[in-house]
Image (cartoon, helix red, strand yellow):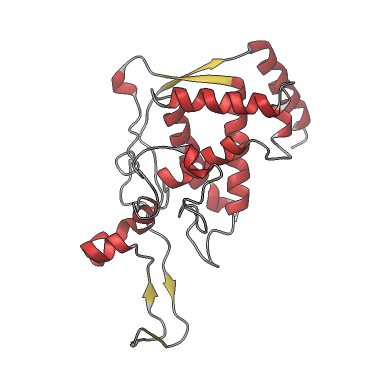
Amino acid sequence: MVSAGLDTVPSNLIMGIAYLASEDGQRIQQKAYDEIMKVYPNGDAWERCLVEEKVPYISALVKETLRFWTVIPICLPRQSIKEITYNGAKIPAGATFFMVSLPQLVFGMYSHFAQNAWAADYDEDHFKMPYQFIPERYLGLTEGSGTPHYGFGAGSRMCAGSHLANRELYTAFVRLITAFTLHPAKDKADHPILNSIECNALPTSLTTEPKPFKIGFKPRDPEKLEQWMAESDKRTSSF
């Protein structure tokens, strides 16, 4: 269960950071910082984010990151354990199932099923303007309700580590945005590819492996950051 998140959570975090450092990401980054400061005006977000989740905009940012970069673009297959009848069709025991969205049925399941979770996350019947990165879509809205995204799959056999992954991403974004401002690289050749399919360096891999890019991190308060890091080192010295 621990190893299962070693490539999925980092990929989501890497691409989330990439977007925050982009031109449009500056707006999202500032709004996220302002919302953190509203909840933690005394500057204790760095510590409190470990034990509580009280900044709705960061929670929305996590959900939009998981939707926009579906790091396992094909949901894992399932296998029937007994013969069943569905809509008049008999499905034998041992049959393999893949989740397929409506657009894939329209355009041909077998030629498009390799991106089935991605297609569900970009279904215009479920998400307005799906090709735009909009954390606000998850703020008190019914859009995407039920299954907010398919980054973890769906149903009773969705990712068993979803709660842990959400908390990891929430904590990481709170700490990164509290401690740094993120900026695009000066050389455009070093900019990240933000398209959720084209950003993958290994298109045939089960999970997304982001292509290399560069961004800049500027500490908001270098002295405070040094203090936080020293306290963290002390707290984890016995690990």
The part of the image, by quadrant, that contains residue 232 is: top right
> Looking at the image, is 111 positioned above or below residue 122?
below
> Looking at the image, is 122 positioned above or below residue 139?
below
Q: Which part of the image, by quadrant, shows the N terminus? A: bottom right
Is 45 left or right of 117, judged from the image as shown?
Answer: right
The part of the image, by quadrant, that contains residue 167 is: top right
Residue farthest along the front direction in this orientation: 141
Residue in view at x 50 percent, y 40 percent: 10
Residue in view at x 44 percent, y 47 percent: 67
Q: Position of residue 168 (x, y in %)?
A: 61, 41
Q: Position of residue 29 (x, y in %)?
A: 51, 25
In this view, the residue in front, 128 or 8, is 128
Is 155 left or right of 226, judged from the image as shown?
Answer: left
How many marks are shown on the rendered structure?
0
Residue in view at x 23 percent, y 64 percent: 106
Q: Position of residue 58 (x, y in %)?
A: 58, 36
The part of the image, by quadrant, that contains residue 25 is: top left
Is 232 left or right of 221, judged from the image as shown?
Answer: right
> Looking at the image, is 51 positioned above or below residue 223?
below
Q: Which part of the image, by quadrant, shows the C terminus? A: top right
Residue 7 visible somewhere in the drawing: no
Q: Position of residue 33 (x, y in %)?
A: 58, 24
Residue 221 visible somewhere in the drawing: yes
